[in-house]
Amino acid sequence: MKRIFLLLTFMMSFVQLRADEGMWLMTMIKRLNGVDLKKQGLKLTPEEIYSVNNSSLKDAIVQFGGGCTAEMVSKEGLLFTNHHCGYGQIAALSTPEKDHLTNGFWAMKKSEELPAKGLSVRFLVRMDDVTKRINDKLNNNMSADQRKEIIDAEYKAIQTENSENGKYSVVVRDFFNGNEFYYFVYQDFKDVRLVGTPPNALGKFGGDTDNWEWPRHTADFSVFRVYADANGNPAEYSPNNVPMKPKHALPISLKGYKPGDFAMIVGFPGRTNRYLTSFGIEQMVNKDYPAWVEASKLAMDVMKKYMDADQATKLNYASQYASVANYWKNRQGTIDAVIKNGTISGKKDLEAKFMKWAILPANEVMYSGVLDNIKANYAQFSNRNVERNYASQLQRNAKYIPVAYQLGSLLKTYADQDANGKAAMKTKVTDAIDRMYDGFNTKLEGEMLNSMVNLYQQRVNKDDASATLLSADAKNLSTLAFSSIFATKESALNFVNNPDRLKIDADPLLKLANGFYTDQKLAGDKYAKVDEAFAKNSRIFLDGLRKSQPDTVFYPDANSTMRLTTGSIDTLPVRSDRNYGGINEKNNYYTEINGMVAKYKKGDEEFDLPQDFLDLVKRKDFGQYADKKGFMPVNFLSNNDITGGNSGSPILNGHGHLIGLAFDGNSEALSGDIIFDPKLQKTINVDVRMVLWIIEKYGKAGHLISEMTLVK
């Protein structure tokens, strides 16, 4: 990859950096050196990529459901995202009788599109830098409470100044561990409908076995449509709403690509920790992530036992299981990659260089002791962090605890009302019960509670554990739960019809839940001073690190704000433990459909394929979507810098035309959230030609193609 020069005034002088590393804020695009980017293949001007007053590329990119990215592909509000991003909505819209997750779904007209309850998309309207405004009111001598009070007041003022009386959502975020601040103005659309999805066998082909691995052969996409009111404004779902008209929709390229071709990705990456110290990485891979891996694997085993036995349970828990499984493999892969790639030693070398700068007379007072302080902080809260990881998986997967805790307070308030008060509250209470028990499997949740609490008791240091959980009879918690007001939806509704304050106060499951959350709060209070010191030390260290390297551009860690990353189509070294189906080092940048069929295993949950799909491939009925060499492309590689949250992001050529959807990283570089490896870190993308072929030929939904602008 050649070097690309970015001209940035982002707290430092003009410098050089590799274009494939870094997730850049959109305002930085205006400082790109157009001449050098043009040499790489970019044909767009900065104004065509990010503009406040005119239509630009940013107007086609949305945050999807708060945790993924999607892109507008038609002037009728049609969008593409990953299948795994729409997975929860697809599962929620499925029943054993109409199983869209298993069988796929295609709306043949707009009236057949399915409202996705609770789903929204977020458009970026504009952003701006308020670092000076906020930092002018701060100093390092302030306490954490004083600092927070000032920052919160500024956040509130900025939100009021830019929301236009509630028309927009305004978010202010800190960057570089609290050294800089930007605000973001968004417009949220809440009527989003499922238009089409391939069956799970295609959208999740390869399952957990292929997840995070290359080569991949999966049609990881789904299609939704955004609706607005008659005036084009955001609105809650209504049958009277109309397809929204985005300011920009991406043209779609059928031309393909080759190694070295320019590629850029725009999306909403979730979180990276590129400036984590060696002490933080050691804590992560030796203690925190092993706890996460063990707890999540146990939760997966419990879910799968019941999912395999009942299709309704499989649909109800499909999204939760997929999410847990994804992070389980990611966390274990991160541990392996950090050890294999020598990430910790690399960080220690960087810190040694920092210390040479920090002990200089001009720097020593502020910076010379900061790394020792951070090391001491980790020693202080190391066991607490392990507890947090086991506790987080327990709260996430053992639903009886959050259900009892959240409903308990509501039911107590309800029980205390007079007759009129109860009548006024009843709908709110019953709606909450309906929502919290939606898809709830009592037997699964009982076993999950027993298993997760038992693991917690075995693994968590007693001095940092919840006293409530330590004293619980883990083998019999399911019995306790089944005798509770919160045992089932029916028992909770029965309480609503026969409220008894004494009964709910004595409820054993509610006592367990309340005790656990109280213990969590007390632990937070216990470590408040240490956390305050750690936040300050981390902020000072990163401030010093940037000052110690004046010829280096430091990009901000990802934090779910829109970013752009540039790079190119690229290859990976061939591994001896993977089946490449004849692909060699030179052309190891794409996969094609015959390789997908070669993995086919009839009846296998991960590698089965629909017969009508196999028939299409056998006939080579690829239409206009075949590569110029005659094959149907499936997935491809680029060296763009992405992370979780980028799922569904568009990968674009130099003209800003869509060539695919980013959906994964590769196991060789799962330490990428901590350190970017320019040799090994890749993005795995689904080829847009595969997407269109499935829509038209497999889904028989060619009417959707007619909405799009195809570039041949």
Image: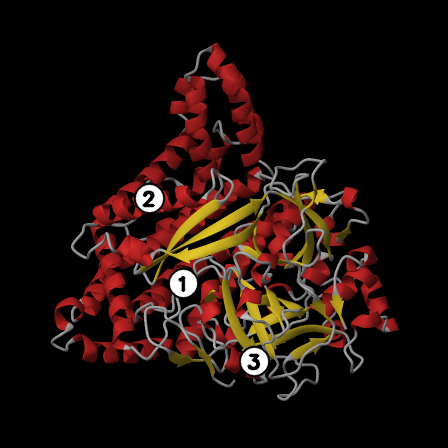
Q: Which mark is residue 38?
A: 3
The local secondary structure at tag 1 comes to: helix
Give the image location of residue 619, x and y in percent: 88, 72
Of the pair 60 and 533, the residue shown nearer to us: 60
Up-down relation of residue 527 to residue 513 (above or below)? below
Left or right: residue 3 versus residue 621 is left
Left or right: residue 95 versus residue 142 is right
Q: Which residue is mark 2?
A: 470
Earlier-in-chain disc, 3 versus 1:
3
Of the pair 643 and 312, the residue shown nearer to us: 643
In this rendering, does residue 639 appear at all?
no
Q: Quadrant of residue 377?
A: bottom left
Of the pair 271 and 458, the residue shown nearer to us: 271
In this rendering, does residue 421 appear at all?
yes
Give the image location of residue 420, x and y in percent: 49, 11
Q: Quadrant of residue 200?
A: bottom right
Q: Nearer the viewer, mark 3 or mark 1?
A: 3
Left or right: residue 134 versus residue 369 is right
Callout 2 crowding tier (Cα within 10 Å): few <14, some 14–19, many ≥20: some
Give the image location of residue 123, x and y in percent: 55, 52
Residue at 74%, 47% in the rendered image: 99
Residue at 45%, 47% in the rendered image: 170
Earlier-in-chain disc, 1 versus 2:
1
Q: Which residue is mark 1?
A: 290
